[in-house]
Image (spheres, rainbow, N blue to C red):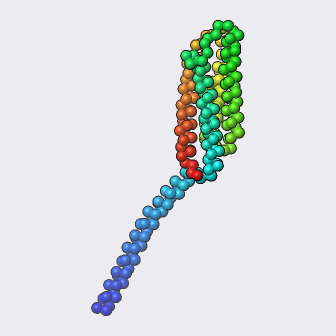
Amino acid sequence: MGGAGAILVSISSFLANKIATRLEHKYQLQIDKELEAYKASLTQRSYVTKIQFDIEFDIYRKLSKGLYEFITTLYTTVEAKDYPKEDATSPQQKIENEMRTYKNMVDRAANLQKLLYENAAFMPQSIYEKYKELIELTTTQFWTYQERFRDYVDGKISLADRTTDSDKAAFETVKKKMESLNNELREHLQKIYI
């Protein structure tokens, strides 16, 4: 039995090594897959300091607030029923009412653009581009409103005639783009780890 036992021990040792190699290879593949998945999840995250996060968050908060205020003011020019002032009868009253709204909108647009450009380096390109596009859309709509201002003041058109269906469609586009930007911003902020 001495020779047969040695052969049996060598065969079982050989088979055990073969099985161990297969199991090791199988588990190594599984571990490699899990490691790659973990690495991929890490690359989607951004690690920043609390100060960096607070600065970036403050920028987004100010931009969102400023854009919302500008859009709200602009909306009052798109929907006559939401316009805060009555249709003044004297040209002087019309001019005074419109100049207050005009000055408010010019100030808001200038502050919004300044805030965006001052902080462009501190935000991801895609979010910067979406803010820029929204600001351009709203200011374009504002200048369209301003072109009709003169006709309204001259009494050529009524308050209700100052807005068109294309104005209302443009405002709907602005609302959808704002919603899209807010969704992207939420996703971006969720990927930031302090």
Quarter assignment of residue 30: bottom left
Q: Residue at x 56, y 33 (%)?
A: 178
Horizontal and vertical percent for residue 12? 34, 80
Residue 163 percent coordinates (x, y): 59, 17
Which residue is pictured at 36% across the width and 77% down the height?
15
Q: Residue furthest bottom?
A: 2
Residue 120 position (above or below residue 165): below
- What is the count of numbered marks? 0
The residue lying at 60 percent from left, 35 percent from top is: 64
Q: Quadrant of the N terminus?
A: bottom left
Instruction: Please say whether residue 167 is visible from this viewpoint.
Output: no
The x and y percentages for residue 102 are 68, 21
The quadrant where residue 107 appears? top right
Quadrant of the image occupied by residue 138: top right
With respect to residue 168, does 67 lie above or below?
below
User: 114 left or right of 42?
Assistant: right
Most foreground residue, 171 or 36:
171
Residue farthest along the left direction in this orientation: 1
Q: Is residue 51 visible?
A: yes
Looking at the picture, tell me which residue is in the foreground, 37 or 185: 185
Check the image and report above or below for 193 versus 25: above
